[in-house]
Image (spheres, rainbow, N blue to C red):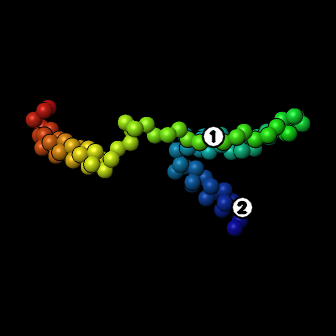
Amino acid sequence: MPRHTLACAFYRVLRKVPAMRLTLFFIFALAACTEFPAVDVSDTARDTPYPTLSSLPYIMPHMAQTDMQMAERVAALQSRAKRLRQINIAALQ
């Protein structure tokens, strides 16, 4: 493709894309080009053992729900949803 054809195609794309999106693209492009400094890790930090993993805390009894409690909650939420669907929104305005 000739060079001037590419320039014309790029210009057509630039005209259609809002300036804010291009600005965001250029910000990300500049951020991608930055060089990050190397992290200096001392020998003591490198030789430090990994932390031990601990078990998760147990689920508290009041948080554990049985199937019956969950079914009751689902039924209550479904009945509430049914009542909310019956409200005439136009009458409230």
- Quarter holding residue 76: top left
Secondary structure state at the residue bearing disc 2:
helix
- Quarter holding residue 90: top left
Residue in front for this viewpoint, 92 or 44: 44
Which residue shows up at 52% across the image and 44% down it?
A: 18
Name the quadrant of the N terminus. Answer: bottom right
Direction right: furthest residue: 43
Q: Amino acid at mark 2?
A: Arg
Mark 1 = which residue? 54
Direction front: furthest residue: 61
Mark 2 = which residue? 3
Q: Amino acid at mark 1?
A: Ser
**Does residue 74 appear anywhere in the picture?**
no
Q: What is the x, y in percent for residue 63?
A: 39, 38
Left or right: 90 in relation to 20: left
Q: What is the x, y in percent for residue 54?
A: 63, 40
Q: CA distance from mark 2 to mark 1?
A: 62 Å
Direction bottom: furthest residue: 1
Nearer-N-terminus badge (2/1) = 2
Direction left: furthest residue: 91
The dot on residue 4 is none
Q: What is the x, y in percent for residue 29?
A: 68, 45
Q: What is the x, y in percent for residue 25?
A: 62, 45
Which residue shows up at 12% across the image and 44% down it?
A: 86
